[in-house]
């Protein structure tokens, strides 16, 4: 099991923006988004190689219920999350960021 989890600053901002957007639509929906994110991160920590490599050495895991993908890397006990990416956005935007 992966012990440490780190979100890079852009991923942190994506989470905060998404939380705010969902919570502005319906009170409590932002917390449901965070719960889905936590569930996905928990699964990645248990089985980091379960998700396929999507781009270079970044793996991609999908959230349930919300249209987001987590792009991450694992190295020696550390899970680093580089993006919490809305699936409707252009993948070119993400590729630029991950290169």
Image (cartoon, helix red, strand yellow):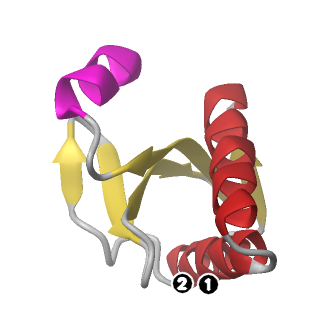
What residue is rendered at 54% in x and 77% in y? 40
Residue sitting at x 55%, y 49%: 75
The front one of 62 and 76 is: 62
Q: Is residue 48 above or below residue 46?
A: above
* Marks 1 and 2 in Cβ contact (< 8 Å): yes
Q: Measured from the top left, where is residue 50 in percent x and y? A: 32, 78
Q: How many marks?
A: 2
Does the stretch in magenta take in 70?
no
Q: Where's residue 52, x and y in %? A: 21, 64
Q: Position of residue 3 (x, y in %)?
A: 77, 69
Q: Is residue 5 above or below residue 50?
A: above
Q: Which residue is mark 2?
A: 43
Q: Nearer the viewer, residue 1 or 56?
A: 56
Q: Which residue is mark 1?
A: 39
Q: Secondary structure at mark 2?
A: helix
Q: Secondary structure at mark 1?
A: helix
- Which of the 4 image quarters holds residue 90? top left
Horizontal side of residue 1 vs 99, given as left or right? right
Residue 32 percent across, percent down from the top left: 69, 81
């Amino acid at each position: 099991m992966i012990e440490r989890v780190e979100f890079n600053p852009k991923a942190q901002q994506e989470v905060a923006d998404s939380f705010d957007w969902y919570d502005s639509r319906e009170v409590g929906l932002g917390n449901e988004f965070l719960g889905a994110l936590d569930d996905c991160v928990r699964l990645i920590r248990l089985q980091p190689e379960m998700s396929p490599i999507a781009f270079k050495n970044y793996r991609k895991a999908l959230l349930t219920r919300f249209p987001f993908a987590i792009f991450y890397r694992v190295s020696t006990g550390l899970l680093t999350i580089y993006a919490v990416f809305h699936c409707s956005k252009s993948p070119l935007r993400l590729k630029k960021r991950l290169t």
